[in-house]
Image (cartoon, rainbow, N blue to C red):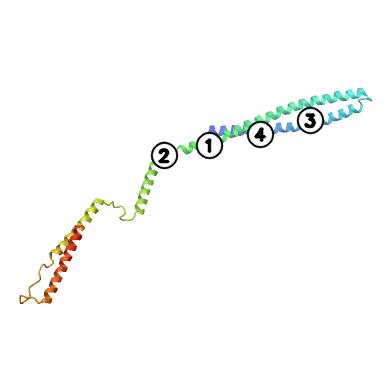
Amino acid sequence: MSGWMSWFAGKKNTTEGARDAIVGLRQQLLMLEKKEEHLNKKIEEEMKKAKANATSNKRLAMAALRQKKAHENELDRIAGTRLTLETQVNAIESANLNAETMVAMKKGADALKGIHSNLTAEGVDATMDKIREQMDLTNEISDAISNPVGMGIVLDEDDLKEELEALEQEQLDDRLAGADRVPSHIPASPVGQTSGPSRVAAQAEEDDEEAQLRQLQAELAM
């Protein structure tokens, strides 16, 4: 912990030092800009003086040109100094940005380390297995709830066909049994003889029953 605090304190001092250096360099640049403005005015003044005395007083014109040249040389030196200072400012700002970025990255790395200190690959795999197990159980429960009662019964088509054939055979047996019970003769009259109309009616009934029997046999044969 003490190492981290000392590093943080050193980083704070470094940051403040970089900020102070940048402020000092920018102040120097402002001063150089003012110096450049002053020299540019001097150059203009010397140029005007040289033009005004170019024909009337050549000695004074030459002196003005020499002074103008000196100001221009000074201006060039200031331009070089400004370029050096601006380069230095940019370098310090870039380095300070990198340092701040490293601080943020270190904090992020420490945060990740703290988070992962309680996590292991095995623990994550075990947790994911539990989640998958519970999801499978949830799906099974949902399927069971959404499936209507009785809809899950698997029906055997062969059993249904056998049951249908048994029903058909039962109906056929019932029909044949009913045909066997049809009377095949007319009961004798009490006196042993039948009158004409009664015999005709009995014969008609017998013919009708035989016709029904033949029709039933034909239907069963189909």
70 over 126 or under it: above or below: above
Q: Which residue is mark 4?
A: 19
Amino acid at dot 4: Arg
N-terminal of the two: label 4 or label 1? 4
State the separation of the CA atoms marked 2 and 3: 68 Å
| CB-based contact (under 8 Å), mark 4 and mark 1 | no
N-terminal of the two: label 4 or label 3? 4
State the separation of the CA atoms marked 2 and 1: 22 Å
Residue at image position (86%, 28%) is 47
N-terminal of the two: label 2 or label 3? 3
Amino acid at dot 2: Val
State the separation of the CA atoms marked 4 and 2: 46 Å
Amino acid at dot 3: Glu
The secondary structure type at the circle numbered 4 is helix
Q: Which of the 4 image quarters holds residue 9?
A: top right
Q: Is residue 19 left or right of residue 54?
A: left
Q: Which residue is mark 3?
A: 36
For mark 1, does the 10 Å Cα neighbourhood hold few (<14), some (14 to 19), or many (20 or more) residues? few
Q: Which mark is residue 108?
A: 1
Q: Is residue 32 left or right of residue 61?
A: left
Q: Which residue is mark 2?
A: 124
| Image coords of residue 61 (percent x, y) | 90, 24
N-terminal of the two: label 2 or label 1? 1
